[in-house]
Image (tube, rainbow, N blue to C red):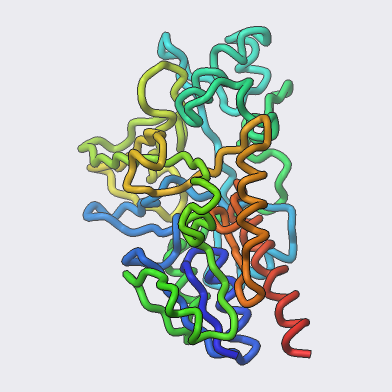
Amino acid sequence: MRILVIGAGFSGAVIAHQMHKAGHDVLVIDERDHIGGNAYDYTNEHGIRVHKYGPHLFHTNNKTVYDWITQFGEWVPYQHKAKAILKDGTYVPFPANKETLDVIGKDNIIDTIFRPYTRKMWGKELEELDPSVIKRVPVKEDDNDLYFPNDEYQILPKDGYTAVFEQILDGIEVKLKIKFNSWMEDSYDHIFNSMPIDVYFKLQRGPLPYRSIKFHTVNLPLPKVLPATTVNFTHDGPYTRVTEWKNMPEHGTNDAYTTVTYEEPCDYTQNNLERYYPVKDVDGLNRKTYEQYKAMVADNMTFIGRCGMYVYIDMHQAINSALNTANKFLEKNNG
């Protein structure tokens, strides 16, 4: 079968690999000038590896996903730690643990950390979001300061994510800076589509809201500036967090310079229509709109990934979803 995959991020690359492995004729297209989707990274002029679209930290309890991804390149252990900086300049562990609660006070944690973060990140009040969004950042009452305390597998690719994608897509035709066009549908037996589902249907049921991030990357003539890999801001300024890349293993050892990236959330319409985070509202209206679009999808097309399925998922979840989607397709079509 002739297979078209739209998008060279994790969802598209995993499916393309599985289709190619099964003997199908696969083409991957992406409108960006690089593979890897939002996990794309590069090494800058100071020998420091930078994640262009913010820190991507691989963590999972799913051994199937772990076994699948670690066949591509060498991976190193990494347990992420972050801090929050309070308005008085004090650093505390983040997500909040016993130390954080001792400094802030359990009754103040919502107004000190969660409420200002939510306003900046989502452009909404806490009460306007589905509770599952906030539960992604737990409050711990012990001394554990790990960002992902419950995940067995926590790793980073030694040579970067872009190198991993090069291996996943090895032997598969990939065309970059190519936008999907409706005429392509007649040339393929099946299409796996990671583009925004509302955009594909020309907003017939209305636009689905997304949040975006403006990334501000700065090189500083200093050996180190942050007490942790990532620091979250609790003030009312425009940034939610800043990441210092050298604090992660295999990301550079330059003693004269360091590189940091500040993240400034905004509506996707304020950032060249870059869609990063589907908005899960408390009333579920956005999901209902998505379901209307989903009901319109033809049999020869499968929507995948965050924008295709309008769901907030991490890398390991995207890989797991793509593997399941590919397996179901191959079981049905390969006998």
- Which residue is nearer to you in this view: 181 or 179? 181
**Horizontal side of residue 42 vs 324, given as left or right:** left
Q: x, y (%) of residue 153?
A: 68, 53
Which quadrant of the figure contains the N terminus?
bottom right
Q: Reply above or below: 269 against 296.
A: above
Looking at the picture, tell me which residue is in the foreground, 265 or 188: 188
- Residue visible at 51% across and 27% down in the picture: 83
Judging depth in this view, the residue of 52 and 312 nearest the camera is 312
On-image quarter of the C terminus: bottom right
- Residue at (68%, 62%) from the top-left corner? 321
- Position of residue 67 relative to residue 154, above or below, is below
In this orientation, which residue lies closer to the viewer: 130 or 238?
130
Q: Tell me if I can see residue 39 in this picture.
A: no
Q: Position of residue 137 (x, y in %)?
A: 63, 31
Asked whether residue 235 appears in the rendered view, the answer is: yes
Residue located at (46% from left, 39% from top): 211
